[in-house]
Amino acid sequence: MWTLHHFALCPFSRKVRLLLSEKGVAYELETEHPWDRREEFFALNPAGRTPVIRNDERGVTLIDSRAICEYFEETVEKAPMINGTAANRAEIRRLVALFDENFFADVTAPLMGEKMHKRLFLRQPPDSRMLREAMRLADEHLDYIDYLIDNRPWIAGATMSLADLAAAAQVSVADYLGGIDWSGHEQARGWYSVFKSRPSFRPLLSERMGGIHPPSHYAEVDA
Amino acid sequence: MWTLHHFALCPFSRKVRLLLSEKGVAYELETEHPWDRREEFFALNPAGRTPVIRNDERGVTLIDSRAICEYFEETVEKAPMINGTAANRAEIRRLVALFDENFFADVTAPLMGEKMHKRLFLRQPPDSRMLREAMRLADEHLDYIDYLIDNRPWIAGATMSLADLAAAAQVSVADYLGGIDWSGHEQARGWYSVFKSRPSFRPLLSERMGGIHPPSHYAEVDA
């Protein structure tokens, strides 16, 4: 059995969870808060980050969300998520990087810092200037999703791919933290609501991070 | 013919250049300074980052250094750089991410900010506290390279891989900017000096970023 070390609002763990569910790979969850800097966790992953996934029977420990996704893409045939020609696959990976790196740095990371870290650990109010800037950048990223979905049924092309999972993972954490204003983003909202109804996504939407409440629309499929 | 949009001290472009040379793929260089925010470059890559590589005859534009490397790994058989079992490949990708993300954030990015960006654009002196912290973290990363090379001939295992290219690309930019103190890192130094003598690496070491001079040992193979 696979064990995934994660925490509820880790967007990279969410991407891996969506992939595992779509592929039908069973796994158990173990909560890890990287900011606790547990020695045992650093021994497992010197980079000290979630997600880490391990399978003790097979003696395999995998680290880094993209490396983990590529591993399951290579070893589990069901529901291919990095598919098509080499150019198609490059387009999927470009968009995964765009959400993992740019959306995360612009939107998810500052929201997590202001609304999760400050609230739970520093007991400080969020910096409203930082929140406004994160929401402004979220709006720009949603514009780009609108543009993509205007031109293709899914984020990276004709079929659902890892790019959709990466985007939905980041968007879902930002939405939980109240950073997404969906008004004026009909295409992005339509794409995301299809996602929210998938069996792979339902368990994520029902989880809560202690002490932080999502907005009422967060887990509603038709919102 | 492929055209790579890069700048001399972009570590991600360096990784791609090392891969292309090892694989024998011919390419032309076009210098792009992403901080100029050229409209034509943003039209090519909405994320506004180097590297971008394009081949107009084939109508292909590739974005994101890892997506680019995976593309050439899939399309050019020579010199496989993400090789072995699925677990080996995951280990290579874990280490690529470690250097692309952690080494870059801890060491290369602050050095580029303090010694390149401030000097060339802001005409400010570097912040010595920031430099000391980047060098302290560089030392920790070199300790980890020492540890890896104590246990394996190459960064990710028995053969040279994309992990070596990613590590050498980051280390070389940090070394150019005077951020690497090699003393006490015999294993890392030995690994890196093998690299410096490779034909793929020589052209990078002879290039200069206008206005910034590397330390005297930078391009010397035996230093």
Image: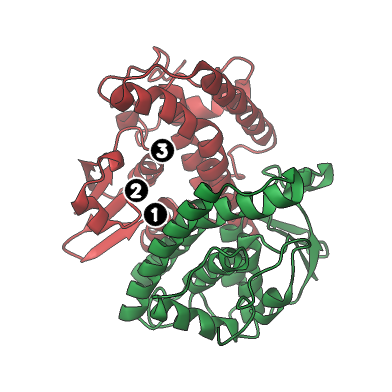
Chain colours: A red, B green
Q: Looking at the image, is A198 positioned above or below residue A164?
A: above
Q: Are marks 3 and 1 on the same chain?
A: yes
Q: In front of the other: label 2 or label 3?
A: 2
Distance from disc 2 to disc 3, alpha carbons, whole Å, reads 12 Å
Amino acid type for the residue under numbered disc 3: Pro
Q: Position of residue A176 (x, y in %)?
A: 40, 23
**Residue for badge 2:** A49
Distance from disc 1 to disc 2, alpha carbons, whole Å, reads 8 Å
Q: Which mark is residue A64?
A: 1
Residue lying furthest left: A57
The first of marks 1 and 2 along the sequence is 2
User: Residue at the location (74% across, 59% down)?
Assistant: B60
The first of marks 3 and 1 along the sequence is 3
The first of marks 2 and 3 along the sequence is 3
Q: Looking at the image, is A174 positioned above or below residue B159?
A: above
Q: In front of the other: label 1 or label 2?
A: 2
Label 2 chain ID? A
Kind of element beneath mark 2:
loop
User: Residue at the location (47% across, 15% down)?
Assistant: A223
Amino acid type for the residue under numbered disc 1: Asp
Specify the quadrant of the image occupied by residue A206: top left
Q: Is residue B101 visible?
A: no
Distance from disc 3 to disc 1, alpha carbons, whole Å, reads 12 Å
Front residue of this view, candidates A76 and B148: B148
Kind of element beneath mark 1:
loop
**Residue for badge 3:** A11
